[in-house]
Image (spheres, rainbow, N blue to C red):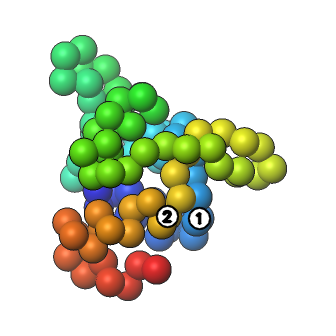
Amino acid sequence: MSAIRDIFAQSGAIRISSKQLVAALGALRSAPGSQLTDSLTHSPITPRLLALRLSPFGIHPHNIQVNGRQSKGYDLTDFTAAFSRFLPNSSSQS
């Protein structure tokens, strides 16, 4: 969850597509929780697996506009409650 918070903070984005988020998580090889893999196949995380992992937190992908294109993804506000509940010092996120 902290890796996702960092991705939003570093990019300055208020929304991100599922594909972009998966790619950004994969690029953060040294960040805790960034090397998410399918526990059965040990393959890299996919947008579908990410959605399954976020579902218990009440976070679900939905249609968003990114660079004028519609895709499935997340708004920063989708994560607000989870960030404040599960991450320390997340009150700076708006």
| Type of the residue with mark 2 | Leu
- Specify few, some or many for label 1: CA neighbours under 10 Å numbering under 14, 14-19, or 20 or more: few
Helix, strand or loop status at disc 1? loop
Of residue 76 and residue 55, the one placed in the foreground of this image is 55
In percent of width and height, residue 61 lies at 49, 43
Residue situated in front as seen by the camera: 67 or 82? 82
Q: Is residue 57 visible?
A: yes
> In the rendered structure, which amino acid carries the disc numbered 1?
Ala
Q: Which residue is mark 1?
A: 13
Residue at x 32%, y 83% (from the top left corner): 91
Gap between marks 2 and 1, in whole Å?
A: 8 Å
Identify the residue under disc 2: 76
- Taking the view exactly as shown, the residue that stands out farthest to the right is 68
Residue 30 in sight here: no
User: What residue sits 48% from the left and 66% below the top?
Assistant: 77
Quarter of the image for residue 37 reads top left
Lower sequence index among marks 2 and 1? 1
